Structures are given as C-alpha cells and as structure tokens.
Image (cartoon, grey):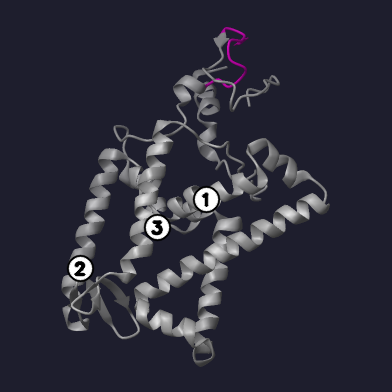
Amino acid sequence: MTEVNKHIDQDSFRDSVATITKEGNRKFIYPKKPKGKYYNLRTWFSIGYLIVFFVLPFIKMDGEPLFLFNVIERKFILFGMIFWPQDFFIFGLGMVTFIVFIVLFTAVFGRVFCGWACPQTIFLEMIFRKIEYWIDGDQTKQMILAKMRWNAEKIRKRLIKFIVFYTISFIIANFFLSYIVGIDTLLDYVVHPANNIGTLAALLLFTTIFFFVYWWFREQVCIVVCPYGRLQGVLLDKNSIVVAYDYKRGEPRGKPGKKRGAETIGDGCSTCIKKYDGTGK
C-alpha cells in the first residue's frame, strides 16, 4: 500500500456519518447505559438545570415574571427588566454578546456546552434516555427488542413508552409556553381549555414535535437542524478539546493485538471493535 492510499484508507472514516448508512438511510443508535463519576456529575448538573427550568416561570419580580419572551405582545422580560420593541437593539446586543461568548468558549473548551448545558442533550440523555433504559433495558435488550417481531411484550413496551414520552413532551411544551405567555395565563388556559381551542391545538402540535424529536429524530437534531452543531467545524481547531475518534491510534482497524502484514492493528478496547473480518472495518 502506498503512502497516499494508506493515508486515504486511514482517513476514510471522515467521509461518512456514523448514524447514516451508505445508502443514505437512518442508522439508529443503541448506546450502552453510561456510568462513572463524570456521568454522575452531569446528572447532578442536569437536575439543577431542570429545577431552574420548571421553577423559573413561577418566580416573579414586582408582579412580573422573572423571564418572559412574549413574541405575540412583543414584550420581553429579563431578570425583571422589561424590553419593548423600541429597546430591541439592547436585547439584540445582549444576544450578539452571548453568541460571541459561545464561539470563544467552543474554540477553547470544545463541545462542553453540547454535553453539559444544551437543552436538547439534557432532555434526551437525562430524561427520555433514562426512561428508555427503564422500559426497554440496556443496549443489547434494545437491539433485540427492535428486531423482535410484534408480540405482546413488544406492543406492551412500545405502548408504555409512547404514553410516557408523549406525557412528558406535553408537560415540557406547557412550560415552554409559560415562558411565552406567562404562568398565570397558562394556568387560565388549563382551567378553561374550551375558551382557548386554538392555543390547545398549537400546544398539541408543539407537543407532537417534541415527541417526534425524542422518540425518533434524536441526535439528528444536532447533525441536521442545530445551527451551533453545523458551525462546529469552523469553531474548532486542532488544539480544541473534543471527544472524537483518534485515527492515529485506531487505524488500521481490526481486532486489538493482531497484525495485518507488517502493520500493527490500532488500539481498541473491544467495545466498538468486536470482530476483525479481514477488511479492516
């Protein structure tokens, strides 16, 4: 193998996305149930974020919500300070400052925000994924269940999962609505749903979108939809801290401890590399 072909072979993993097949179809991920001190720390951080998310709408200052983003009435409240359309340049300046901070933070610390503070990650990994482990089991059981024919066990688990996921999505959607209309208005909607059919329909639509994201779309949000995720390639450099495949250690691929001709197979812990079939894949 020439040096050029060798380099192309070792870098070929860059030409594809792990969640998409060669035919362009979705390839579902069945992650192992994580554990360890950093995962436990992330869990505690996430609990703190969720407490803030669910409690913040009830906190008021001078009779007004602490945070409100009422785009309908063009009224925005940040830490008790009210911003109207004529004050939007101040609000916009704050948003630009926040975006610049995210850019600089990413360049130095990598994707820490994605793993520790992103709402998509927190809702998926710390709520829906944990429930999925409880209902469907760990990685192996989930894969078996996915390939299993439809029987009483699979229907029961899928039905329970559907109901729980949709219920949680409905609760989250209500709290997001409270950040737009205020918690008092939201409670009025709950007490008098017949007088707010349009709002209820919009809420159910938003709930369905939430449910679709966490039931099926999942990590594709980060790959396809999230603008921050799509900008990662230009925000990171070789000195940024990232969790990524190290091709210098992992290539050429194969069963650890073996050799392919004069080459020594790359490092591996046998978690991802289960079998070496002679192709190096």
Vertical side of 161 occupied by 194: above or below: below
Vertical side of 50 occupied by 28: above or below: above
**What element does badge 1 sit on?**
loop
Location of the C terminus by quadrant is: top right
On the question of residue 210 being in view, the answer is no
Location of the N terminus by quadrant is: top right
Query: Percent x, y for residue 255?
Result: 62, 17
Q: Is residue 273 left or right of residue 141?
A: left
Between 222 and 189, the one nearer to me in the picture = 189
Between 248 and 273, the one nearer to me in the picture = 273
Distance CA(mark 3)–CA(mark 1): 14 Å
Query: Percent x, y for residue 131?
Result: 57, 50
- The majority secondary structure of the magenta stretch comes to loop
Disc 2 designates what residue?
79
Query: Percent x, y for residue 237?
Result: 31, 37
Tell me the magenta residue range.
251-262
The crowding category of the residue bearing disc 1, from other C-alpha atoms within 10 Å (few below 14, some 14 to 19, many at least 20), is some
Mark 2 vs mark 1: which is more N-terminal?
2
Asked whether residue 178 is drawn in magenta, I would say no
**What element does badge 2 sit on?**
loop
Distance CA(mark 3)–CA(mark 2): 27 Å
Contact? badges 2 and 1 (CB < 8 Å): no
Question: Image point 42% across, 37% down: which residue?
Answer: 40
Disc 3 designates what residue?
227
Disc 1 designates what residue?
219
Frontmost of labels 3 and 2 is 2
Frontmost of labels 2 and 1 is 2
